[in-house]
Amino acid sequence: MLSIPHMIVVFLVVLVVFGPQKLPELARSLGKLLAEFRKASTDFKSAFEDEMRDLERQARVAELRKKNAEADAAEARAKEQAAAGAVDAATGTIMPSPPEAAPDYPTEEGPVLRPAADAIPRLDAANGESVAATPEPEHKPETEAATSGNPPTHDHQQPA
């Protein structure tokens, strides 16, 4: 960079060589030249930055495509594994498939409800009869019902 004394010397040399009439004209052309140079350098810089942004965008798109392809492949593997056996969602580990020989193993999602063998049938609220299709025991004599300690049912009550 030129210091102030060097710039004064250059200005005096230009003044002597070109004369005082040509000096303003030279300054205008030099100013126009510098303005065009700045404009060209700004255009070049913006074009370079645009190209860099495009390259970065293309790299991100390629990375996203790669991640999507990996996710699709992982999903396909998970579906294949799910077909072979259940996959634990929390850990991603393969659970053993249900045994084929066990007929009471649940194959659907959720709990399976089965009636117990010794279930007590519910009573129909309208007439007090049981809803289950189980045969009723034979009628006990009234004395046996009274001595057994159980309260008599409506069938065993005596009319008043």
Image (cartoon, helix red, strand yellow):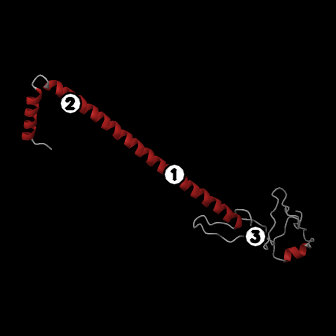
Kind of residue at disc 2: Leu
Would you identify the image quadrant in which residue 27 lies? top left
Would you identify the image quadrant in which residue 102 lies? bottom right
Residue extending furthest toward the top = 21
The residue at which mark 2 appears reads as 30
| Label 1, label 3: how far apart the Cα atoms are | 46 Å
The residue at which mark 1 appears reads as 62
Would you identify the image quadrant in which residue 148 lies? bottom right
Question: Is 43 in front, or is 159?
Answer: 43
- Residue 109 is left or right of residue 134, and the answer is left
Q: Which of the two marks, 3 or 2, is nearer to us in this view?
A: 2
| Residue drawn at the location 82% of the way across and 59% of the way down | 124
Q: Do the residues labelled 3 and 2 touch (CB within 8 Å)?
A: no
Residue extending furthest toward the front = 17
Indicate which disc, 1 or 3, sits on the residue closer to the N terminus.
1
The residue at which mark 3 appears reads as 105
| Residue drawn at the location 62% of the way across and 66% of the way down | 88
Expressed as whole percent of the image width and height from the top left, the position of residue 26 reads 17, 27
Q: Is mark 1 on a helix, strand or loop?
A: helix
Q: What element carries label 3?
A: loop
| Residue drawn at the location 64% of the way across and 69% of the way down | 94
Expressed as whole percent of the image width and height from the top left, the position of residue 146 reads 85, 74
